[in-house]
Image: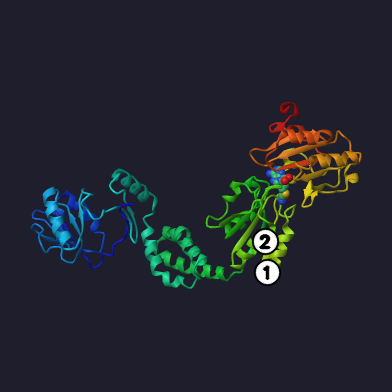
Amino acid sequence: MDHFPIFLATTGRRIVLSGGGDAALAKLRLLMKSTARLTVFAPTPAAEIVTWAATGKLTLIRRAFDHGDTICAALFYAANEDAAEDKRTAAIARAEGALVNIVDNLEDSAFITPAIVDRDPVTIAIGTEGAAPVLARAIKADLEERLPASLGTLARIGKAFRAASYALPLGRARRDFWRDYYFNTGPKAMNESEEQVQPALDALLETHLNKTARAGHVAFVGGGPGDPELLTLKARRALDEADVVIYDRLISSEILELARREAVMIDVGKEGFGPSTSQETINDLLVEHASTGAQVVRLKSGDATVFGRLDEEIDAVDAHQIGWHIVPGITSASAAVASIGQSLTRRGRNASVRFLTGHDMKGFADHDWAQLARKNEVAAIYMGKKSARFVQGRLLMHGADRATPVTVIENASRADQRILETTLDHMADDISSAALSGPALTFYGLAPRAAATAATDIKLEEMA
Ligand code: SAH
């Protein structure tokens, strides 16, 4: 950066310009936006300059610029459209202590005038150090289009309200208030009329003051199996209102995008047996954020109450007297069974269904295998990929029918969902050769209902 951008205070200061033609006109149009006192030296000024002088926008002196004319001037523009005259006048101004700009002569200029997008008091200056004026103009045009004309008005009203906003504590609370004003409440009020902005701002401050007084809270939210349309309305609302979202690895990016734009997003992804954020760290994060008054969403895949280590987190939050509630979600067994067109329970077949995990913290999990090995039992096995051989062995050992159907649904409800049909005696081999990379739910005792799965079914022959 050879030129460092700054904004110059102009009120009550002099800016002097030498020249009366097109180059002078272009610069003056910009300079007249400022509150500086403008003086123009031109023996033969363009008609516009004469008019501006007549209406008090600048002082016009109808002669060539000379010694003593830039005394106490902050800036001097040489806009004579004549190299020799530019050089002469610039030398005088420089000697008298003004910062000098020679129009279209970057090398001999002490500063550049940027392209300006004017939403006073919001001013955007664009400069390319002379490299690409075309680019600067394109950027300006783009911004002109994008920034509402009302932005300046909003900023002016906002500026006058700054002292009132000090009622909010410095930091997040105050930032949230202003963000809400500029990007939501302010533009909405402005759409009705400028008079609506001030009352809207008063009401907004009241709302934010109440919010600050609100205690921190943790919502344990079930994020469902992945498809954002399987989120509950309550889950969506919680995400809309969250200050902080602490989420697991299995939460899909489409769902994360629904969180409030300003929310702090914290990934505490746990990878099967791999590296993970420790449970203690997660507990600490919940407490730390809720203690500052934040509305925290602890977003877990499926239903938070199913294999979610929810109780440890509730205990941690409880220990600090922080309020919490649970928002139920669609557990992956529900999404998976829907994808194969089956029921979890069925009259005459099974009156109970078990949700079990293939492994727990201590390793492979033990269950009442003898009970499960009986005819017509149904179980939804979570985290069952690595433990498939163990589960298969236990069930066969307890006399389960080798032909019992087993269905594995990988990425249930997501675009990359796959369904693997097998039987108890082949399940371990089939699961390992399918090389499933996504989360997978195994149904013991359920086969897909034919028509429901035609599209995504992986037939074993195809995979071989
Ligand atoms: N609370 C979650 C389960 C967390 S344990 C729930 O209610 O679904 C993680 C296990 O959930 C994974 O190992 C896998 O067995 C299952 N799972 C999560 N999302 C899944 C999905 N989209 N498809 C299939 N299984 C899924």
Q: Residues within 10 Å of mark 1 (few under 14, many from 20)?
A: few
Q: Residue at x 25, y 67 (%)?
A: 11
Visible in this render: residue 242? no
- In the image shown, does 359 or 330 lie closer to the viewer? 359
Secondary structure under tag 1 reads loop
Q: Which residue is mark 2?
A: 283
Q: Residues within 10 Å of mark 2 (few under 14, many from 20)?
A: some
Q: Quadrant of residue 436?
A: top right
Q: Is residue 404 above or below residue 231?
A: above
Judge from the rendering whether residue 26 lies leftward or rightward of residue 167; answer left or right: left
Q: Is residue 28 above or below residue 137?
A: below
Q: Residue 338: image x %, image y %?
A: 73, 41
CB at mark 2 closer than 8 A to ligand 1? no
Q: How many marks?
A: 2
Residue type indicated by callout 2: Asn
Secondary structure under tag 2 reads helix
Q: Quadrant of residue 8?
A: bottom left
Residue type indicated by callout 1: His
Q: Residue at x 79, y 46 (%)?
A: 358
Judge from the rendering whether residue 405 lies leftward or rightward of residue 18; answer left or right: right
Q: Which residue is mark 1?
A: 320
- In the image shown, does 108 or 444 lie closer to the viewer? 108
| Mark nearer the N terminus (1 vs 2) | 2
Q: Residue 169: image x %, image y %?
A: 51, 71
Q: Is residue 416 above or below residue 362?
A: above
Visible in this render: residue 64? yes
Q: Residue 134: image x %, image y %?
A: 30, 43
Q: Residue at x 72, y 26 (%)?
A: 462
What whole-number distance in Å separates the C-alpha atoms at marks 1 and 2? 11 Å
Q: Residue 382: image x %, image y %?
A: 76, 46
